[in-house]
Amino acid sequence: MSNPKTKTPMKTRILSNWRTSLLGLALLIITIILLFKQIITGGEFIALLPTILGLLYVQDSIFKIKPPYSRH
């Protein structure tokens, strides 16, 4: 049984990881516009939805670029 105090609330997670949340929100807006203009179908929208929702929830660590190793 998990302890509810150790879980991060969804609002805090989205706001603290703003890079991926912004990317997910931008993709959501773009896909909704494409759906209303009938450029994509509802099936294609549903296929993209898990990726978009995943970007809203994932941590920003996937976008951190590590500097190359120095040769000292």
Image (tube, rainbow, N blue to C red):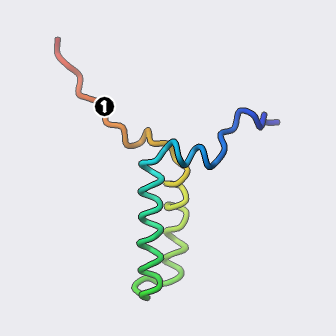
Q: Quadrant of residue 27?
A: bottom left
Q: Quadrant of residue 6?
A: top right
The reply, left or right, for residue 62 in relation to residue 12 is: left
The residue carrying pointer 1 sits among few (fewer than 14), some (14 to 19) or many (20 or more) residues within 10 Å by Cα, namely: few
Residue 53 at x, y percent in the picture = 55, 59
- Residue lying farthest to the left in this orientation: 71
Q: Nearer the viewer, residue 67 or 43?
A: 67
Residue 15 at x, y percent in the picture = 53, 47
Q: Amino acid at mark 1?
A: Lys
Residue 9 at x, y percent in the picture = 66, 44
Q: Quadrant of residue 22?
A: bottom left
Q: Tell me if residue 66 comes above or below residue 41 in the rendering.
A: above
Where disc 1 sits, the SS reads loop
Q: Nearer the viewer, residue 43 or 55?
A: 55
* Residue highlighted by disc 1: 66
Residue 4 at x, y percent in the picture = 77, 37
